[in-house]
Amino acid sequence: MTKAIQTDLQALVFDVFGTVVDWRSGVTREVAQFTQACGLEDKIDPAAFADTWRSHYAPAMQEVRAGRRPFTRLDILHRENLEKTLQSHGVTPSALPADALDQLNLAWHRLDPWPDSVAGLTQLKAHYIIAPLSNGNIRLMLDMAKRAALPWDAILGAETAQAYKPSPEAYLRTADILGLAPEQIAMVAAHNNDLAAARRCGLKTAFVARPAEHGPQQKTDLVAEDDWDVVATDMIDLARKLTGSF
C-alpha cells in the first residue's frame, strides 16, 4: 500500500502521546520525584499513579465531545484529573503545596521521545509537512517539542480545531488549517481507533507500533488491526517506507 499513500501525499500529522513520546515513563519519573519531595512514598506507587491519571484522560475529553462542557484545554483537564487521582490514592490535594501540584501537572510537557522519533521525524520532514494532531494544547506541544527537539513544521494543538479526537472536526479542521484536502494528509498513530477515525474523514493512515506504551502488561494496539496504508515498526521504519531513506 505504500506506493498508493505516496500519491499526492503532502503532510503527515501525528498522534503524540504514546506514538511520538513515551508518556508513561516520563510521568512515572515525575510522580516519583513528587512523592519523594512530599513524603508520599508510602501512599503512591508512581507507575500505578501514572496509569490511573491517564485513565481519566478519555472520560474528561468525552465531556467536551458530548457537549456537556465547553472546549477546555488539556492542561486544565490534566490538573483536574491529577486531583482526582490523588484523592483515589488517599491524598487530599488541598493539603499539598499548590506549586508542587502545578509542577507535577507539567510532567506532560516534559516527556521524552521514543529513541527513534527524532531521527525518523527529521527524515520525514525533508519530504513532507509534519505536525502534531494531538489532543494536547498548543503550549504543551510547544514545550514538549523544544525540550525533546521534535522538528515540527507547525504546532497544531487541540485549540486550533476546538475539538478532541476522535471527533471528525479534529481531523477535518486540521486539514483545513493546513490548506490541504484530507486525502493529501496521512495520520500517523500507534492507536488503531485514532487511525479508524482519521480514515473515516478521508485521511491516509500509518500505524507505528508502540507495544510498550502502557508498560510490560500492554494488551491493546500491539499490532495493526486493519489494512492501514502503511504499517511500520517505528518512525525510522516509517521514514524508510515513505522516502526510501536510511
Image (cartoon, grey):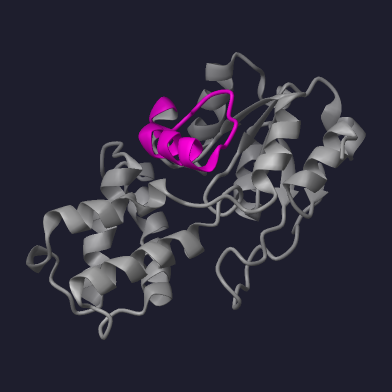
The picture quadrant where one finds residue 50 is bottom left
User: Which residue is at 45% across, 37% downward?
Assistant: 141
**Magenta stretch: residue 152 in it?**
yes
The quadrant of the picture occupied by the N terminus is top right
Query: Seen from this angle, which residue lies furthest bottom?
Result: 42
Q: Is residue 106 visible?
A: yes
Question: Is residue 230 placed above or below 44 in the rendered structure?
Answer: above
Which region shows up in magenta?
A: 138-160
Judge by depth and name the residue closer to the eye, 34 or 127. 34
User: Which residue is at 84% across, 35% downward?
Assistant: 242
Q: How many marks?
A: 0
Q: Is residue 228 visible?
A: no
Judge by depth and name the residue closer to the eye, 58 or 82. 82
State the predominant SS element of the stretch in magenta: helix
Residue 194 percent coordinates (x, y): 60, 47
On screen, residue 101 versus residue 17, left or right, reads left
The quadrant of the picture occupied by the C terminus is top right
Residue 51 percent coordinates (x, y): 43, 69
On screen, residue 46 versus residue 8, left or right, reads left
On screen, residue 39 versus residue 28, left or right, reads left
Residue 44 percent coordinates (x, y): 30, 79
